[in-house]
Structure formats: structure tokens, C-alpha cells
Image (spheres, rainbow, N blue to C red):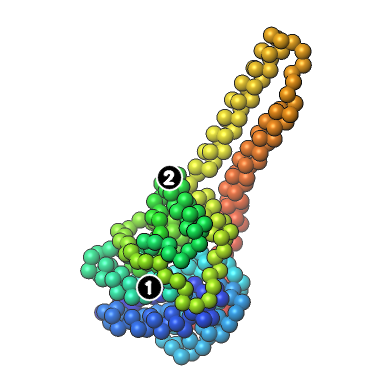
Amino acid sequence: MTKKVSLVVPCFNEEKTIPLFYAALQAVKPQLRGAELEYWFINDGSQDTTMAVLRDLQQKDPQQVHYISFSRNFGKEAALYAGLQATTGDYVAVMDADLQDPPEQLVDMLAGIEDEGYDVVGTRRIDRAGEPVIRSFFANTFYRFINKISSTPIKNGVRDFRLMTRQVVDAVLSMSEYNRFSKGILSWVGFNTKYLSYENRDRVAGKTSWSFWKLVRYSIDGIVDFSDAPLVLASFVGFASFLVSLMGIAFVIVRKIIYGGSVTGWASMVSVILMVGGLQLLCLGILGKYIGSIYLEAKKRPIYIIKEKK
């Protein structure tokens, strides 16, 4: 029986990369053990001619190429979820359109599932060549930090690019939460997983839509989604501040009894008040982030809205 491999490809302003991506995958197709290919391009509110490129490609290859276009930009996580929901293949791969994910590795991924019995075969970059030094530093710091505070392990350098069995895809889709962090979700569901290593590649065309601050916000979402350590930290800071305050009050009373007179040092007192106030605001911010996530989940808004599908 012929197997089908579905490809989920989120697209945001990828007008230049889509034709190159399609050509590269078609070149790899003969090596995929006769498997059929099913493309699902997810247009995530692109502002260029991405949609026109997808329509043209779908008209040229209606059997293999399909697309979903959102009503606006909902983010990559929503695009991945929509793509996984639309797929019909026995195996499903998640890939970026910029060819930073090597298409030729699909051959080894398929072998890993069919010959070695893995449920998931993912990819992991062994270096960050070409990335700004500051971005690499914060990325490595994030992975070290989240693996210390979370019970869900997330390997450094792991990409979204992976091939999964239908069982794994169904497990991921069962997690219909609004706040999504795919790297954590894919690790949390478990299953027998293997990682293939490769050296970092540059985009074939266009510019990345991931700014430094978008990555920072995405990292914070990942920490909130898969660890309650910040809440524990906020509680610890609050308790520590309380103890320090008690010691300060005791010191003032003892000093008053022994030396008498008014207590000097108003400048230092103001500094302490500002410091404690800052700690309180920090803790409120941490609590607010978790409450905000609960608020979004409670509203039960759709993860995405489809404008066009074919």
C-alpha cells in the first residue's frame, strides 16, 4: 500500500521561497520509497504576494498542493495547528519554507520510522553559524534555563522540522490549548523519538519575520506554558522580603531603645522602599502573565480563522 507524506509549511511573506521550496521537495520525492506527497501551505496573513504564488502553484499541481489562508496573522503556532488538522497523510512533516530545513533529510526520517520503528524523527542544529552572537547567547541561555525549571525536556537546537506518525499527530491535536509552544508540546506528548543533526543553513531568499523581541516573547510563553517555577520564585521573593522587613523593624526598635532619638537614614530607607516596591511589581507581573494566559484560555476563542482554503 502506498504511503502518503503530508508536509505542513507555515508561510508569512514567503513569496520568493515557496517556488524554491516546492522544487527542492519535488527533487527529493523519488527517494521517498514511492510515497505520495501532500503539501499544506498555511498563509499566515502575509502582506506580499504569497497568496498569489500559492494559488498559482495549486492550479499547476492540484493533486498535491493545498493551502489555507488566514483572515489575518495569527502566528506560526496557529499555522502549525491548522496544518496538522488539515493533513491526511500516514506521516506528517513540519517544515519551514525558507529551506533552512534540509529536504533531503526526509529520506533518513522516513527510514527512521519505517525501518527503525521510531514514532518521531526530528532534527537538531549542531551550531548556530550565521546567527547574531547576542541571539545565539540568549537562545542557549533559554534552553539551559527552561530545562532546569521544567519537567518537560527541550533539547537545545531542536527544530520544528520533524516527521511524525499519524498517532503522534493525533496526540498533538488533542492538546487544543490557545497558548501554544510547539517545542514543548511535541516533547510533552512523548513517543519514541530520534534526532538527526545538521549544520545551520541560511535562508535561500527573503528575510526572517522573527525579530529578537518576538523570540524573547516566544521564550517567555514557553516558560509560562511548561513551568510554574516563576510563580514559586515570586512566592519566595515575597517571603524573603517579609523576613527582611521583620528584621528591619526589630533593628529600628532595638536602636530606638538603646540610643533613643529619631532614626536617621531617610535616603537609605527610601532606597529600600523602592527596592521592595520593584520586587512587588515584578511578582505582580509574573502573576499577571499566568492570569493572562488563563484569561485567554477561558474565552475559548478559535486558534485561527480561515479566509480561504483549497
- CA gap, disc 2 and disc 1: 30 Å
Percent x, y of residue 290: 57, 48
- Image quarter hosting the N terminus: bottom left
Q: Which residue is mark 1?
A: 102
- Tell me the SS state at disc 2: helix
Identify the image quadrant of residue 91.
Answer: bottom left
Local crowd at mark 2 within 10 Å, few (<14), some, or many (≥20)? Answer: few
Q: Which residue is mark 2?
A: 148
Q: Is residue 144 among what the camera can see?
A: yes
Q: At x 44% / y 87%, what residue is drawn?
A: 62
Amino acid type, callout 1: Pro
Q: Nearer the viewer, residue 80 or 202?
A: 202
Q: Residue furthest left?
A: 115
In the displayed structure image, the side of residue 154 where residue 252 appears, left or right: right
Amino acid type, callout 2: Lys
Q: At x 22% / y 69%, what residue is drawn?
A: 115
Q: Is residue 221 among what the camera can see?
A: no
**In terms of sequence position, does the residue under pointer 2 or pointer 1 come before the other?**
1
- Tell me the SS state at disc 1: loop
Local crowd at mark 1 within 10 Å, few (<14), some, or many (≥20)? Answer: some
Q: At x 39% / y 51%, what residue is drawn?
A: 153
Percent x, y of residue 136: 47, 58
The label shown at residue 261 is none
Q: Residue furthest right?
A: 262
- Tell me whether circle 2 and circle 1 mark residues in contact (CB < 8 Å): no
* Residue 143 vertical position relative to residue 161 in the rendered view, above or below: above
Q: Residue furthest top?
A: 258
Q: What is the number of callouts on the image? A: 2
Q: At x 66% / y 35%, what residue is drawn?
A: 275
Identify the image quadrant of residue 72.
Answer: bottom right
